[in-house]
Image (spheres, rainbow, N blue to C red):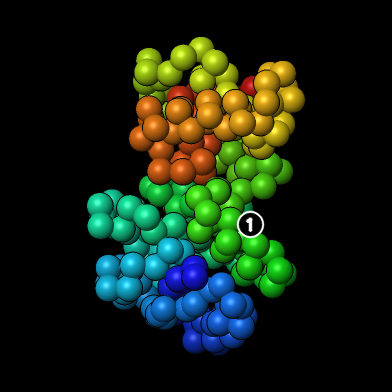
Amino acid sequence: MIRVLLADDQALVRAGFRALLDAQTDIEVVGEAADGAQAVRLSVQTRPDVVLMDIRMPVLDGLEATRQIAADSRLADVRIVILTTFDLDEYVFEALRVGAGGFLVKDTEPVDLLRGVRAVAAGDALLSPGVTRRLIEEFASRSRAPLAPMSLDALTDREREVMALVGAGLSNEDIASRLFVSPATAKTHVSRAMIKLGARDRAQLVVFAYEAGLVRPGWLG
């Protein structure tokens, strides 16, 4: 059973999500939060598998709530999905950087929401290749210069290569095809890079790839 916590300041939005999720045999809504501070408290109390987190909420916004949940060692297994009205919300990249596992636009199709919740609960990043590329390009276009590169000394050359491809939005299957290896081998390289860099999930590895300068579409044109 996938345990889900809903965090949104609009009661009607929460009610809609609850009705959809509770109708599934493998998903259970374990709580509702109307602000970010309540989302943090309920995460500690209920230990959900997935938190559907709105960005703009009173008391504590979704970004800070995400930061606090991701930083709490007791909640290491909690996966956060950012809910946003626009698929390139200005806060989405920062939310991914501090620990969110992906994001969904609020008007997404019900089947896609359910698929997303199940994917994130299984440990996958909720970022399609196309959305990943657009997200990084949008963030890069707003920056005047790259951030100071993070250290990749712990990675092998192949792991750096794979990390760059992850940052460019390629799936494990795409990476395998590009490097002429099996999907299982590609997945292993991705997993090792995540472990060595302390990435919470694949979404955060994408952010690290950007911060390390492996992906810089805004400056490469």
Nearer-the-camera pick, 213 or 29: 29
**Residue drawn 45% across the image and 59% down it:** 80
Q: Is residue 7 visible?
A: no
Question: In the figure, is residue 45 to the left or right of 58?
Answer: left
Indicate the position of residue 111 as horizontal and vertical percent values.
Answer: 71, 69
- List the residue tagged with mark 1: 87
Which residue is at 44% across, 57% downward?
79
Mark 1 closeness class: few <14, some 14–19, many ≥20 residues within 10 Å: some
| 68 relative to 190 in the view: left or right | left
x%, y% of residue 127?
Answer: 61, 48
Residue 171, percent across and down? 66, 37
Decide: is 186 above or below 161: below
Q: Position of residue 28 (x, y in %)?
A: 49, 77
Residue found farthest to the top: 157
* Amino acid beneath label 1: Asp
Rendered residue at 60%/26% (across/down): 185
Quadrant hosting residue 60: bottom left
In the rendered view of the protein, which quadrant contains the C terminus? top right
Does residue 32 show up?
yes
Q: Nearer the viewer, residue 149 or 156?
A: 156
Quarter of the view holding residue 12? bottom right
Q: Nearer the viewer, residue 115 or 70?
A: 115
Q: Residue at x 50, y 58 (%)?
A: 121
SS class, disc 1: loop
Left or right: where 34 falls relative to 166: left
State the count of labels.
1
Query: Is 41 located above or below residue 145 in the figure?
Result: below
Vertical order, 18 against 207 (above or below): below
